Image (cartoon, rainbow, N blue to C red):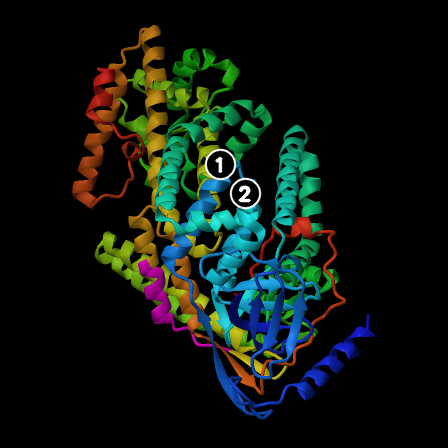
């Protein structure tokens, strides 16, 4: 396993010698240490995704759900492929057959669970406990499946988190947080993000995570002030005129939703780095609120048919505000050729389906 | 010969080489670096290369046997190559998909099919499946659901009854005949103080029927309450509680499957259509319960007029409260809309 890594490194060196730098159309080489902010580009369009989405939906219905695995891959491929950094497109490589198997297993397990727990409630309880016990494994498989099937510049991402560590951050710590009346929740959230980011790698290079528990407490505490003020306003307007309270409650909900999404997304990305390249995200609460509001109104008016446009608009906004602060260039990442995600468990992993990154 | 440009990645490092792909009429394919003209790969035939299927105008990837990849935005050139060398018969399903996705006529057809499907599943499919499931549930499940519903209502909405024990005893005795006629559903009547829910009655899946003190207070004859019981027993007999539970989750599941999105924002989006559909279902249940009550009352020589009379009194009371306090009680009528048409049936 270790013997091939040096080979790969040698080839980087070989290429360095064979390719004369700074000639022709390639961008000027930037000296190491010099930084440039590279934007993520998103070229997806609502009407294009609408067509893909509607065909996905109809074929999934016609095939009684079997096509949904292909639909998922196509949807992800569209969003990945429409995302580029320095002209290189992202790629989603999952095999629909594997996803289909995963869905069949999940559906049959669910039917088994329903039947058994209907016959004997105690069996249902035992199965639920077994599910909780198996949860960390599922989370790890799912993250690994997603990462392994994502690539850019022909180098795959990967995930190397341990199940024991996942058990700590997804089961034990949340339990402890519940016992402390939620005081630990920001810390738990921090641990979960740290676990995901630090175990994700691009080729052989791991991501690093520089946020601190204090940053996460900061987000939660800063949400408290608008929350308390907002509730006061809602209650106050309720005394004045009840319909006004409904309106202010909706605005408050929207604001808090935007506040939390923006703050936590910015915190996550700004704390992420890959080697010496840092991610930078500068979503704005006001912009995001307007985006969510207009999406919601359009969805309501079109009885949900606006969904593809809403998804494209949200993705575009997020990616237009995401940058990679590149130190040097992105040419020297090395593929991890040894690490193959074992087939065992892939089937199940789609069930959890965490979408990491984009 | 077909020539197009793109980028070349060897799959071992992330190094990018701006390159040109050349495919000869013989099928021979070679990729050359544009800067140095160095041959990166040369294969005897295009068919040795795996080509990703076209998806809108997202970049196309050509995978070479050594793990290398050629990425290009020139979708039309790649399409031409696939058509020439793999032939229409080799055009696989995914290639055909792109043609469906790129034509608005097919897309509009799909949209029409989807709307027809949604219409039939909402008006026919979901209710039929839900009642099939609800009627197959074991009594233990109904018991559990009923007890849980009662516990939640006791915690959040209802308070212990303030009716004196004589009234309670008198009413329960008066209810004996109708309850005895439904023993297979294990009906029991509970009294609770409604407070914010006002004059109200609920049927739980396990046969429990909750009458609020306010409802009892507004009745002028005990038979009026028997008429309400008959209506609520209609809900029990038709298993409306469980059917609603299954229907609502099926509806949510259907919409989730359509949008494939579990994020909080989509819940916000889908709230209204789901709510409107649920209201339509609920009205259908009320009609069913009405018919059950009418049939029962008629066959037991209780004037159906009693039901209408009580409903009209609740309506009058609600209007009064609305005018004096600005409205506090969400009335029994808001979930049991007493349309002219419904009242007429009970006259």
Q: Are marks 2 and 1 on the same chain?
A: yes
Q: Which residue is mark 1?
A: A62
- Give the mark, 2 or 1, whose residue is nearer the N terminus: 1
Residue at screen point 27% across, 56% down: A247
Q: Farthest residue toward the front?
A: B26
Residue at 37 percent of width and 18 percent of height: B230
Q: Callout 1: 10 Å neighbours few (<14), some, many (20+)?
A: few
Residue B132 located left or right of residue A149: left
Question: Residue A312 appears at what percent x and percent y?
Answer: 41, 60
Residue A289 colored magenta? yes
* B28 relative to A247 in the view: left or right: right
Q: Position of residue A269 (x, y in %)?
A: 53, 74
Front-lying residue, B86 or A277: B86
Q: Is residue B340 above or below residue A78?
A: above
Residue in the foreground of this view, choosing between A153 and A123: A153
Report the disc number at residue A67: 2
């Amino acid at each position: 396993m270790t013997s091939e890594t040096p080979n790969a490194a040698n080839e980087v060196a070989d290429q360095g010698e064979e390719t004369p730098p700074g000639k022709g159309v390639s961008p000027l080489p930037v000296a190491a240490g010099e930084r440039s902010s590279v934007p993520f580009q998103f070229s997806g369009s609502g009407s294009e995704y609408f067509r893909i989405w509607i065909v996905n939906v109809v074929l999934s219905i016609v095939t009684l759900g079997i096509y949904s695995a292909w639909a998922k891959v196509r949807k992800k491929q569209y969003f990945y492929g429409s995302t580029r950094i320095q002209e290189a497109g992202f790629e989603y490589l999952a095999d629909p057959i594997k996803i289909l198997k995963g869905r069949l297993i999940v559906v049959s397990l669910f039917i088994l669970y329903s039947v058994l727990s209907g016959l004997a409630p105690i069996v249902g309880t035992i199965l639920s406990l077994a599910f909780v016990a198996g949860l960390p494994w599922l989370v790890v498989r799912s993250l690994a499946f997603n990462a392994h099937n994502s690539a850019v510049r022909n180098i795959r991402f990967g995930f190397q988190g341990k199940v024991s560590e996942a058990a700590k951050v997804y089961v034990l710590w949340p339990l402890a947080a519940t016992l402390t009346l939620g005081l630990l929740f920001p810390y738990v959230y921090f641990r979960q993000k740290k676990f995901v980011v630090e175990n994700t790698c691009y080729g052989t290079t791991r991501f690093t995570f520089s946020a601190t528990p204090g940053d996460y407490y900061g987000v939660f505490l800063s949400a408290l002030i608008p929350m308390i003020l907002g509730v006061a306003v809602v209650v106050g307007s309720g005394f004045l005129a009840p319909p006004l309270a409904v309106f202010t409650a909706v605005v408050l909900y929207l604001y808090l939703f935007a506040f939390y999404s923006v703050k936590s997304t910015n915190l996550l990305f700004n704390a992420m780095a890959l080697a010496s390249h840092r991610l930078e995200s500068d979503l704005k609460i006001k912009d995001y609120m307007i985006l969510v509001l207009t999406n919601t109104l359009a969805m309501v008016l079109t009885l949900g048919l606006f969904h593809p446009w809403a998804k494209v608009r949200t993705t575009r906004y997020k990616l237009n505000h995401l940058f990679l602060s590149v130190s040097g260039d992105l040419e020297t990442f090395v593929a991890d050729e040894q690490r193959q995600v074992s087939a065992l468990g892939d089937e199940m992993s789609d069930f959890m389906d965490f979408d990491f990154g984009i | 010969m077909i020539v197009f440009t793109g980028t070349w990645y060897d799959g071992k490092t992330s190094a990018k080489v701006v390159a040109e792909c050349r495919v000869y009429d013989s099928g021979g394919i070679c990729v050359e670096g544009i800067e140095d003209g160095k041959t990166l790969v040369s294969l005897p035939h295009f068919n040795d290369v795996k080509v990703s299927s076209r998806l809108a105008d997202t970049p196309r990837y050509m995978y070479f046997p050594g793990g290398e990849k050629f990425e290009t935005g020139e979708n039309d050139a790649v399409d031409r190559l696939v058509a020439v060398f793999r032939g229409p018969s080799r055009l696989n399903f995914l290639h055909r998909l792109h043609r469906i996705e790129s034509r608005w006529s097919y897309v509009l057809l799909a949209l029409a099919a989807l709307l027809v499907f949604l219409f039939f599943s909402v008006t026919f499919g979901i209710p039929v499946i839900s009642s099939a499931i609800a009627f197959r549930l074991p009594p233990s499940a109904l018991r559990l659901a009923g007890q849980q519903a009662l516990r939640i209502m006791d915690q959040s909405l209802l308070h212990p009854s303030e009716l004196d024990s004589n009234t309670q005893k008198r009413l329960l005795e008066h209810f004996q005949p109708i309850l005895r006629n439904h023993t297979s559903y294990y009906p029991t009547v509970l009294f609770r103080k409604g407070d914010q829910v006002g004059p109200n009655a609920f049927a739980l899946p396990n046969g429990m029927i909750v009458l609020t003190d306010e409802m009892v207070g507004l009745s002028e004859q005990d038979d009026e309450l028997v008429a309400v019981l008959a209506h609520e027993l209609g809900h029990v007999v038709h298993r409306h509680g469980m059917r609603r539970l299954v229907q609502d989750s099926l509806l949510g599941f259907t919409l989730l499957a359509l949008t494939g999105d579990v994020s909080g924002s989509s819940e916000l989006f889908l709230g209204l259509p789901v709510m409107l559909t649920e209201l339509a279902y609920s009205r259908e249940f009320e009609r069913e319960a009405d018919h059950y009550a009418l049939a029962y009352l008629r066959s037991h020589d209780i004037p159906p007029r009693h039901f209408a009379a009580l409903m009209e009194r609740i309506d009058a009371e609600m209007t009064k409260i609305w005018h004096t306090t600005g409205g506090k009680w969400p009335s029994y009528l808001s979930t049991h809309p007493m349309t002219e048409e419904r009242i007429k049936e009970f006259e």
